[in-house]
Amino acid sequence: MSERLHDLLARQVAHAPQRPFIHLPDGRSLSFADLGTLTDAAEGELRGIGVRAGDRVLVVAENCPEHAALILACSRVGAWSCGVNARMAAGEVDAFAHKADARVLYFTASSSASAAQHAARHAGVASVLPGMRRSAVASAATPEAPPLRDEVAALIFTSGTTGAPKGVMATHEGLVHFARVSAASRALGPGDRSYAFVPMTHIFGLATVLLASLAVGAELVMRPQFDPADLLDALAHHGVSQLQGPPALFSRLLAHMHEHGIEHPPAPALRYVYTGAGPLDLTLKRRVEAAFGQTLHHGYGLSEYAGSVHLTRLGEQRDDTSVGYAVEDGEVQVTDPASGRPLPVGERGELWIRGRGLMRGYFRDSAATAAVMRDGGWYASGDLGELHADGALFVVGRLKEMIIRSGFNVYPAEVELALNQLPGVQRSAVVGRPEGDGNEEVIAFVELRPGSSFDAAAARAHLRQQLAPYKLPAHIAVLPELPTSHNGKVLKRQLQQQAAALR
């Protein structure tokens, strides 16, 4: 049997039990041995209430040590942890519990007011884990049978930014392998501290942050959610050497810095800055690099691949938005969306993925799994991109988001790049709006930096210099804030609904 998630903790407890691992907002720190003790307690409770191998344990959470302990305890028992962000609505949480056929629900009540509210709805009782509550055990829940029972470590729900979320079955092998790949890609080691606000309910927080740090004995400055002032304090005073998050994090951080007149925040230990889990705009990249004096690294990952399948290289400076090069045991092929035929270097097409980290499918959804799997073990991602001769990959958008205007393809990312160059624009998003003749209009939404205004005439003059006529937005709407998921991805399905109402 391949390594399991809990083996990563066991190795650290055996080699350096008293080394600090998790640093909390109240100043407390937990060692690897302390996390081991929490995991022992969680394992005992899971077994005591009848959780079996192949059961799903839904954890309604914001980041805290107890959530990490439950993930590792589920691994010991053979159950699958299923993280759900506590800030989701009641209906969303209940739908995920139903979709997962959860045996029991846990709530990180002491670290999250939202989780406490969900616990109250489910009449949660106290857990042996401090500050945690749990639901009654669902006697009707059916454990999964081998071989999936033994291969799968976690059920990760897709973000559902363009459609209904699905439950990705992520394997122990894929997650453990990527934990080491991620750590190696940034030379992560015991002397490093990462700012761990990215939710562990998401593949980014689970694999890139928690498991990679466990794999090499690095430390975590753990936070339940993002607070730009706290992040700046951690960079200045708490030895944070690695900063990772979605592009939305960096947009919010730069907005906070602009509002408070901070140009170059002190960060004496910082040596690695990374963004993923969403498209990166070149304007944002340059602003982050100017602020920190560091390369902003980038990667291409997705829930269906247990982490990233392409990453930029440590020590390489690129003045573009490439997501870098294929990781160990990962493959990407650019294909013609209509025929599935591989395309030559430099041509745009749908990205197909395969490798060691690929999911085992969508949980109890054979139709959705069949819709994305292709001969040869390839997964059709729905993402559009192109490979360059040096092996660098560029992701240009989503196949479903591509806009057909006057018979031409319009990639939203191209229009967003031009919009983000406008003075005062924090970030933008572009969607298509169907017209009666089967054509689509280009509709743009912009979010402004604090204190900025929007000059529509100047914006249109700039866009006419940057874009072909068929790419020009028919409408540009200013929003106080773009709608985003809890993982920082722009919810374009909501923007499409707003676009339909614009006149």
Image (cartoon, grey):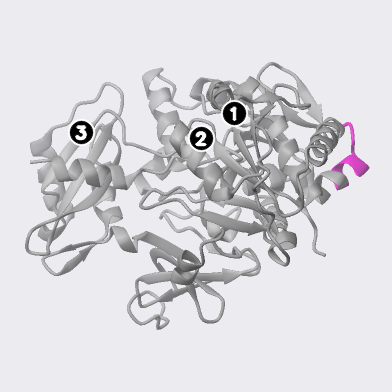
Q: From where the camera sits, is residue 274 visible?
A: no
Measured in 3D between alpha carbons, the distance from the residue under mark 3 to the one under mark 2, in whole angstroms, is: 29 Å
- The residue that mark 1 highlights is 267
Q: Residue at x 45, y 51 (%)?
A: 165
Tell me where residue 303 sits by quadrant.
bottom right
Residues rendered magenta in the picture: 11-18
- The residue under label 2 is 292
* Secondary structure type for disc 3: strand
Foreground of the two, 460 or 351 = 351
**Quadrant, the C terminus:** top left
Seen at 46% across and 47% down, the residue is 159
User: Dominant secondary structure of the magenta stretch?
Assistant: helix
Q: Assign a secondary structure to mark 1.
A: loop
Residue 143 belongs to magenta span: no
Whole-percent x, y for residue 479 in the image:
24, 32
Question: In the figure, is residue 356 to the left or right of 297?
Answer: right
Cβ atoms at labels 3 and 2 below 8 Å apart: no
Above or below for 353 versus 183: below
Q: Quadrant of residue 435?
A: bottom left
Closer to viewer: mark 3 or mark 1: 3
Residue 478: mark: 3
